[in-house]
């Protein structure tokens, strides 16, 4: 996926990025059976994005749909991009592949993850976790990949639209359902944040400067253990 490939979708870059993300998620949702009948992989993209928006508003594909209906979107480019995404056969790939493709579609740049710490994490089947904003669920997706028996709740902090979209996708990949689970926690600098329950494992990954350094984060988040991911 090249920037030019995405840019062809819409003259406005944020809209083009959102459309590309919507196409990746819609293909994945159709292939994994997340979309209700009669939605099909070859259905009109406007219909599919409308269904995505209804099922999980955290994905924020409503603005994508509005752009599509306005006639500004290059529909030929949309068809070509959708065909390219289908050719990736994301349903056959590990969740990380789909997540990273969606990340590229949004133009998000996230730092590398410390894999050893996540592989060796002391994680029980029902452990709860919290990932600091704004990693978009990247560290959480790695953690789930290395611990397939883990079924506990995974909270993901987000202060930006991109982090929220990726967090919603990470939750969907982990639960294998598109419906929102409430696991994405909006946390913006100027707002009062919701109180977090005591969690088992804190994932300190890509926190914004206002959230504090790792030591500050460790003090402010009630967690039994922490990993600098």
Image (cartoon, helix red, strand yellow):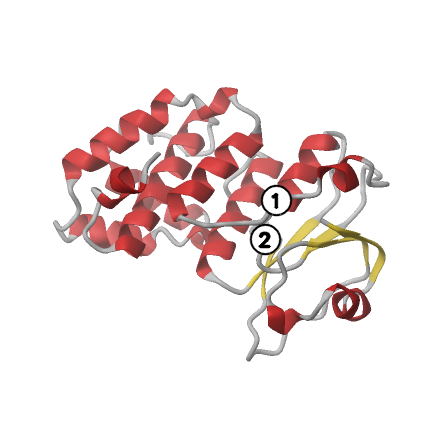
Quote the CA–CA distance across marks 2 and 1.
10 Å
The image position of residue 136, as x and y in percent, is 56, 51
Mark 2, residue position: 135
In the image, taking residue 50 as reference, residue 224 lies left or right, namely: right
The image position of residue 164, as x and y in percent, is 50, 56
Does 194 sit above or below residue 63? below
Residue at (83% x, 40% y) in the render: 123
Residue at (46% x, 43% y) in the render: 103
Location of the N terminus by quadrant is top left
In the image, taking residue 137 as reference, residue 197 lies left or right, namely: right
In the image, taking residue 21 as reference, residue 80 lies left or right, namely: left
Residue 70: in sight, yes or no? yes
Circle 1 crowding by C-alpha within 10 Å: few under 14, some 14–19, many from 20: few
Mark 1, residue position: 112
Residue 41: in sight, yes or no? no
In the image, taking residue 117 as reference, residue 188 lies left or right, namely: left
Of residues 47 and 163, the one drawn nearer to the viewer in this rendering: 163
Residue at (53% x, 65% y) in the render: 159
The image position of residue 91, as x and y in percent, is 48, 23
């Amino acid at each position: 996926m090249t920037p030019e490939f995405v840019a062809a979708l819409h003259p406005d870059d944020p809209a083009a990025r959102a459309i590309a993300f919507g196409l990746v998620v819609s293909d994945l949702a159709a292939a994994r059976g997340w979309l209700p009948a009669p939605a099909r992989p070859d259905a009109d993209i406007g219909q599919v994005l409308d269904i995505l928006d209804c099922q999980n508003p955290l994905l924020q594909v409503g603005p994508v749909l509005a752009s599509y209906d306005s006639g500004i979107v290059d529909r030929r480019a949309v068809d070509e991009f959708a065909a390219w995404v289908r050719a990736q056969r994301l349903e056959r790939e590990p969740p990380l592949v789909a997540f990273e493709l969606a990340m590229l579609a949004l133009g998000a740049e996230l730092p590398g993850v410390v894999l050893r710490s996540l592989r060796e994490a002391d994680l029980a089947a029902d452990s709860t976790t919290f990932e600091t904003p704004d990693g978009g669920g990247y560290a959480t997706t790695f953690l789930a990949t290395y611990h397939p028996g883990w079924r506990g709740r995974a909270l993901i902090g987000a202060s930006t639209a991109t982090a929220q979209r990726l967090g919603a996708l990470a939750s969907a990949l982990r639960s294998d359902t598109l419906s929102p689970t409430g696991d994405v926690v909006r946390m913006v600098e100027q707002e009062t944040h919701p109180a977090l329950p005591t969690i088992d494992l804190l994932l300190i990954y890509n926190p914004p400067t206002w959230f504090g350094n790792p030591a500050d984060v460790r003090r402010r988040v009630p967690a039994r253990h922490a990993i600098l991911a």
